[in-house]
Image: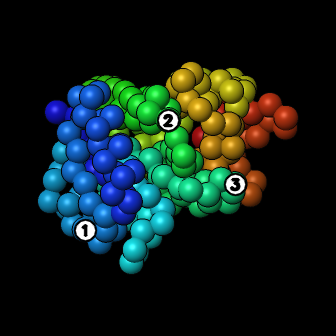
Amino acid sequence: MKKILLVEDNDDIRGFIKINLKREGYTTLETASGEKAIELFDIYTDIDIAIIDIMLPGIDGFFVSSKIRQKDEKTGIIILTAKSQEEDKINGLSKGADDYIVKPFSPSELIARVNSLYRRVSMARNNKDKITVRPFVIDVDSRKLYKNGREIELTHIEFELIKLFANNSNKALSRNEILDSIWGEDFIGNYKIVDVNISRLRQKIEENPSNPQYIKSIRGYGYRWDVYDEC
């Protein structure tokens, strides 16, 4: 069963989203409250995606997103915002969201974003393998990353990024290549989402994020995962 937690305080928008998700075969848990959303997430352990409006009464969507991400690294998160400013998108992504949709949006855009994220979440949960790139071990089955034997907590997108880099060690990847590989060719957005998530990943895996050892920037192009025998 494809289950989505929908957090939106506008009744009309919530109804619009629910109808379109139902047509695509999704089951929806809905609430207008951030506090209630966190309660529902604790009760239902089979939620695949959370769609969260930023502007909520009480605690806002940024807080809800960060709490859900703290509780589960695997659940997909899409934030909804009426604001188009770059800082709002970046703030949402930094709180653990995988994607964002700016209001107003069309049913086709909504479904494309949801389906794309659901495919990534579903594939990630079904993959079984281990990738070793010293000093890291990537357990694809359990979706865990270890560095020198110590587990590092990652979001869904961060895990997909490090898996992509590990499978393409010492190869320069353009931002567009990364965008297509992780978010899908049907993703409606730009490469800023790549930069934000890589910056967040560096904070977790690098000893000195401002001078990264593993994920190197290639100016005007993209990134490269550097692997050395002495690692």
Which label belongs to residue 106?
2
Look at discs 2 and 3 and give the one toward the viewer.
2
Sequence-wise, the earlier of marks 2 and 3 is: 3
Residue occupying image coordinates x 26% and y 60%:
31
Amino acid found under the numbered disc labelled 1:
Lys
Q: CA distance from mark 3 to mark 1?
A: 28 Å
Mark 3 element type:
helix
Q: Nearer the viewer, residue 149 or 23?
A: 23
Which label belongs to residue 36?
1
Mark 1 element type:
helix
Mark 1 is surrounded, within 10 Å at the Cα level, by few (under 14), some (14 to 19) or many (20 or more) other residues, namely some
Q: Is residue 110 left or right of residue 205?
A: left
Q: CA distance from mark 2 to mark 3?
A: 20 Å
Mark 2 is surrounded, within 10 Å at the Cα level, by few (under 14), some (14 to 19) or many (20 or more) other residues, namely few
Q: Is residue 152 left or right of residue 174?
A: left
Q: Nearer the viewer, residue 167 or 110?
A: 110
Sequence-wise, the earlier of marks 2 and 1 is: 1
Residue occupying image coordinates x 36% and y 63%:
9
Using the rendered image of the protein, determine whether residue 164 is visible from the camera's viewpoint: no
Residue 142 x/y as whole percent? 29, 39
Residue 177 x/y as whole percent? 65, 24
Look at discs 2 and 1 and give the one toward the viewer.
2
Sequence-wise, the earlier of marks 3 and 1 is: 1
Q: CA distance from mark 2 to mark 1?
A: 27 Å
Which label belongs to residue 86?
3
